[in-house]
Structure formats: C-alpha cells, structure tokens
Image (cartoon, helix red, strand yellow):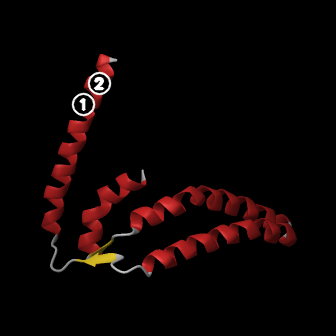
C-alpha cells in the first residue's frame, strides 16, 4: 500500500512542493510497520494517563522508543546525498496525463488478473 500511495500522489507532490524524495520508499518500509503500534499504544497510554499519571508515563515509554527510532530513520535518510530531486516549472496540466496513464495500467492489470482468475 505504501508504494501504491506514493505512485498515486507523485504528481501532486511534484507540483505542490517542486521536489520528490528518492529515499521515501525504503524509509517508509522501515517506518510504516511501527505506526499502528504508536497509534494504538498512544491511545491506550493516553486513556491510562487519564486514570493515573504514573501508569500513563510507564505506558508511553516504549512508544517514545519507537518514535525515537522513526525520527532516527528519517534523519538518516534525509542526510543521504541525492535524497530528493527538485523540479522546476512543473505545471498542474501534467497531472491529467499521468493519471490517465496510471488508470490505463490499472485497467490492464485488472483485466489480466481477471483472466488468470477465470483460468484457475
């Protein structure tokens, strides 16, 4: 899903920010598995913290370690040479052909997958 999200948002990111990250995919692969833990654990620790400040702090400690890991991964990848690529004068009209091509690939894949499923 991470790759699909990056492919789907690529032209919007380029037009909006004028750059893309060349290291976002490996960074996301290292980070994304930990996000559900942080979200669920943060919710649980916050609820526990309402009842007891001490229990809340104890439950937040492992989350802090996970968040520290996430920040470390982002910092390491951001310092890599050529971590991002800048675009100059990219306009919004380039988005339409990109999404047409993306839709065409998706339809082609869905058609092939359907044909394979029918054979089995």
Q: Which mark is residue 79?
A: none
Which quadrant holds residue 51?
Answer: bottom right
Residue 21 is left or right of residue 72, and the answer is: left
Residue 113 is left or right of residue 48, and the answer is: left
Position of residue 95 relative to residue 15, above or below, is: above
Labels 2 and 1 touching (C-beta < 8 A):
yes
| Most foreground residue, 43 or 70 | 70
Position of residue 78 measured from the top left corner of the image (x, y, whole percent): 44, 78
Q: Which residue is mark 2?
A: 116
Q: Which residue is mark 1?
A: 112
Which quadrant holds residue 47?
Answer: bottom right
How crowded is the residue under tag 1: few (<14 C-alpha within 10 Å), some, or many (20+)? few
Position of residue 99 relative to residue 86, above or below, is: above
Position of residue 13 measured from the top left corner of the image (x, y, whole percent): 30, 69
Q: Residue at x 30, y 57 (%)?
A: 7
Q: Residue at x 21, y 46 (%)?
A: 103
Where disc 2 sits, the SS reads helix
Which quadrant holds residue 37?
Answer: bottom right
Position of residue 6 measured from the top left corner of the image (x, y, whole percent): 35, 59
Residue 11 is left or right of residue 81, and the answer is: left
Residue 45 is left or right of residue 53, and the answer is: left
Give me the C-alpha separation between circle 2 and circle 1.
6 Å
Position of residue 31 measured from the top left corner of the image (x, y, whole percent): 53, 63
């Amino acid at each position: 899903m991470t790759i699909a999200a990056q492919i789907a948002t690529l032209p919007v990111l380029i037009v909006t920010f004028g750059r893309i990250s060349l290291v976002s995919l490996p960074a996301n692969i290292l980070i994304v598995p930990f996000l559900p833990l942080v979200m669920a654990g943060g919710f649980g620790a916050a609820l526990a913290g309402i009842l007891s400040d001490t229990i809340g702090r104890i439950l937040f400690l492992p989350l802090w370690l996970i968040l520290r890991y996430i920040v470390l991964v982002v910092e390491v990848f951001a310092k890599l040479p050529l971590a991002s690529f800048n675009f100059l004068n990219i306009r919004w009209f380039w988005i339409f052909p990109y999404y047409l091509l993306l839709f065409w690939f998706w339809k082609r894949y869905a058609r092939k997958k359907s044909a394979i499923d029918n054979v089995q």
